[in-house]
Image (cartoon, rainbow, N blue to C red):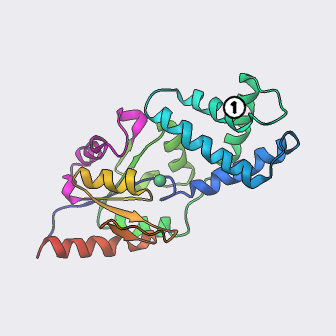
Amino acid sequence: MTDEQAVIFDIDNTLIDDDFAVKSACKTIYQIHSNSFDKNFDSFLNSWFAALHKYFPRYLNGSISFTEQRVKRISEVFKDSTSQLTGATANAIFEDYLKSYENNWKLYDESRQGLDRLQRKYKLGIISNGQKEQQIQKLETTHLKAYFSEIVISSDVGCRKPDPKIFICASTRLGIPSKNCFYIGDNIAVDIQGANSAGMTGIWLNRKGKSTTLNIEEIKCLTEVEYVIKKENLRTHL
Ligand SMILES: [Mg+2]
């Protein structure tokens, strides 16, 4: 009989379709402000994602606050617009964005089914880079929170993926050594390499069928997690 094992999840674009929520909220903002832009929705969306990927990591590494990254993102996206942008209007735009973003949090079709199956055999946990209140709110809104014995969010513990410290923190809180933990995420560098460097088995959730030359565990759908765990248990007990 194997020791107790844990399955730990990333949230965004792993359990919850965050890209869908971002795109939907961008549509809302674009519709309100399209008269101030000389660009189509696709280029607006591209500039939104570029600003998100530029400023959100600065919040995660502590160089700007959660509120500052919001204002900076709006300022960047709206820099070519004809609107006069003050701090107050940037905040107001972000509030509209946020309302729509929160209204569009949704699970992938198989998220609940995957968790229902796994919770019968494994302790479940979360490790997420983000702001604690917002990430917890996502799990509550989508009725996922009760599945998890431990929820570790970077803003709460002072380190972030791929730092092995945040993975070790989750393993300690769960009371399960990292060699008995599996971590599921959609980002190879942040999720999988981070988990592996902490002694866990990272499983890359590759929904879009991207290719990699790395020798890592890979699944296309959350219902395949258990198959990988069983395969790994057989391999390590040979
Ligand atoms: Mg993710």
Of the residues shown, which amino acid type is indicated by label 1? Answer: Ser
Q: 89 left or right of 153?
A: right
Q: 86 left or right of 150?
A: right
Which residue shows up at 36% across the image and 32% down it?
158
Q: Nearer the viewer, residue 21 or 175?
A: 21
Residue 223 location (% of width, % of height):
42, 72
Q: 94 left or right of 215?
A: right
Q: Which span is picked out in magenta?
A: 153-181
Which residue shows up at 50% across the image and 52% down it?
12
The residue wearing badge 1 is 75
Tell me the quarter of the picture where residue 151 sits. top left
- Indicate the quadrant containing the C terminus: top left, top right, bottom left or bottom right: bottom left
Residue 182 location (% of width, % of height):
29, 60
Residue extending farthest right: 35
Distance from mark 1 CB to nearest ligand 1 atom below 8 Å:
no
- Is 177 inside the magenta-drawn segment? yes
Q: Secondary structure at mark 1?
A: helix
